[in-house]
Image (cartoon, rainbow, N blue to C red):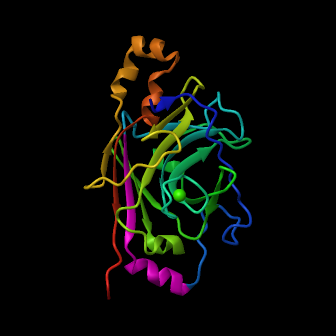
Amino acid sequence: MDIRILGLLVLVLLFSGCGGASTLNTQTGNEDTHKSLNNSPTITVEMTMLNLPEQLEFNRFGTQAGQLEYHWGMSLDVNDDGIVNAGDLRIALFHYKLENDAALLAAPTYARAALFEHLSNGGYAVVLDVIPVSSQSENTLRLTLSKSAHTSLENLPPTTRVYFSTEGMTDSGDRYADFYPAEETYAEMSADGRFEDEIDPRSLNSEAMKKFLGLEIDDSAAQLDMVSMRVTIEEQTLR
Ligand SMILES: [Ca+2]
């Protein structure tokens, strides 16, 4: 069962000492780096939620400063050992409410897109050199990243294992998360890059299922509940 309320996934964001940049949403790199982005193959992940509105509420009244409100992401088994661990990378959208942040309505892509490194302590560090491009189409979030974003991605094969997870808060302040195939577990890449969550998430709209799971979940959990995913890892082409 891959859906549960949690306080398990601890995000450690290190805003200093990584990539030499400390300013959010600021690209770094020299002209050569930017030039190479234009021709680089990409990694694209699409994550379809049970219900993803065109606008979400950010910095909600019930959220404490420093709390994670939204996180949708995919990890890649870059070091090819079958374990989610240091050396792997993660492409994600996330949003923390910070001190004095005012409540607002915005598209889900208002959340910050980032490339993360998995750390040995179970946390993440943000890699700021290249920022994934994010977009929304109905219930689907799409993140596209140049393989030149990180040296470990440049020769990453299309068969790389992947792990999807979401985490955040519902409108009533409950923690909610969804994992595929299971918490901190990689899935072998499928033949067509497509994945479907094995639980019928629509069951979560059933009061009986909520009671069975011991969860008091409101309908806003649907914006964090994965239904299907698709991954495309382009191969390096010879030029
Ligand atoms: Ca690994």
157 horizontally vs 103: left or right: left
Question: Where does the N terminus fall, quadrant-wise?
Answer: top left
Against 163, residue 208 (above or below) is above
Q: Residue furthest left?
A: 192
Q: Residue at x 35, y 77 (%)?
A: 236
What residue is shown at x 45% (from left), y 16% (from top)? 210
Provide residue 224's location: percent of width, then percent of height.
Answer: 46, 36
Q: Looking at the image, can residue 150 be seen?
A: no
Q: Is residue 25 left or right of residue 105?
A: right
Q: Quadrant of residue 167?
A: top right
Tell me where the magenta segment starts and ends, as one range: 31-48
Q: Nearer the viewer, residue 179 or 222?
A: 179
**In the displayed structure, does residue 83 sit left or right of residue 11?**
left
Res 130 visible: yes
Q: How many marks?
A: 0
Residue at x-position 47% and y-position 29% = 221
Note whether 19 is above or below 114 in the view shown: below
Say if 232 sits above or below 71 in the image: below
Q: Is residue 182 magenta?
A: no
- Name the quarter where the C terminus is drawn: bottom left
Give residue 125's position: percent from left, percent from top.
Answer: 65, 58
Which residue appears farthest toward the front when viewing the image? 81
* Percent x, y of residue 191: 26, 55
Q: Is residue 43 magenta?
A: yes
Question: Is residue 103 positioned above or below 31 on the image?
Answer: above
64, 13: nearer the viewer = 13
